[in-house]
Amino acid sequence: MNAIAHLVSPSQAYVPLRLAGRPLALKAVVLVLGVAFLTASSYVQVPMYPVPMTMQTFAVLAVGAFCGWRLGLATIVAWLALAMLNVPVLSEGKVGLAVFMGATGGYLAAFPIMAIFIGWMAERGWTGRTVPAFITLLIAEVICFTMGVGWLSTIVGFDKAIEYGLVPFALGDLVKTVLATAILTAGRRIGPKTR
């Protein structure tokens, strides 16, 4: 129990950008850079079987972990709002309200929840070391697939939602979780140990 208490102690928080208490202007700059990072990552495609892997969800994981839950949430919401306003910031340049009501709507709705969860856990020390970081990010991916497949199942049925909305992407998202974990762990080793 002591080990668990130590892991979740606020004194062990690991939010790499350390923006708590910083000027609002700096946070606004980070938000804009975060939106740009999310957009650029959405357009990156890595060859993978059975479908190409975009780095969109990797960017969501990173924004939540690096910014904390408040700024992470604001960044994700700003990015999604641009997509609603027909700015091509999402994967494949998809835009408009129809995207949020269509097959990918559940995944998009999950992104802010992921940012809140990861950022909140980061502020309690659960992204500061390899195993807790991996667990936190993996749970965030589970949240994404649960909401995404749940919504998709209302459109195509549960079996097809699993077949088309989970199975082709599971391996790629596991790779992204491992990559995000590695980056957080490396940052912890290089940077200061506390906020």
Image: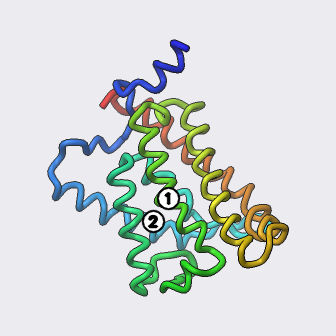
Question: Which residue is found at the position 61% from the left and 48% from the top?
Answer: 177
Colour scheme in the image?
Answer: rainbow
* Mark 1 nearby-residue class (10 Å; few <14, some 14–19, many ≥20): many
Instruction: Kindly identify the amino acid type of the residue bearing the numbered disc 1.
Output: Ala
Q: Residue at x 49, y 84 (%)?
A: 97
* Residue 146, horizontal then vertical, whole percent: 67, 57
Figure disc tally: 2
Residue under pointer 2: 38
**162 horizontally vs 33: left or right:** right
Is residue 171 rendered to the left or right of residue 95? Answer: right
Give the numbered dot on residue 82: none
Judge by depth and name the residue closer to the eye, 161 or 92. Answer: 161
The picture quadrant where one finds residue 189 is top left
Where 67 sits versus 92, above or below?
above
Looking at the rendered image, the quarter that the N terminus falls into is: top right
Among the 4 quarters of the image, the one containing residue 125: top left
The answer to whether 32 is drawn above or below residue 14 in the figure is below
SS assignment at label 2? helix
Identified by mark 2, the residue type is: Leu
Looking at the image, which residue is at 54% across and 68% down? 108
Quadrant where the C terminus sits is top left
x, y (%) of residue 76? 41, 63
What residue is rendered at 36% in x and 62% in y? 75
Please provide percent x and percent y for residue 124.
42, 32
SS label for mark 1:
helix
Give the residue pinned by disc 1: 59
Looking at marks 2 and 1 on the same chain, the residue that comes earlier in the sequence is marked by 2
Mark 2, Cα crowd under 10 Å, few <14 / some 14-19 / many 20+, is many
Disc 2 from disc 1: Cα separation: 5 Å
Marks 2 and 1 in Cβ contact (< 8 Å): yes
Q: Residue furthest front?
A: 154
Q: Residue furthest top?
A: 2
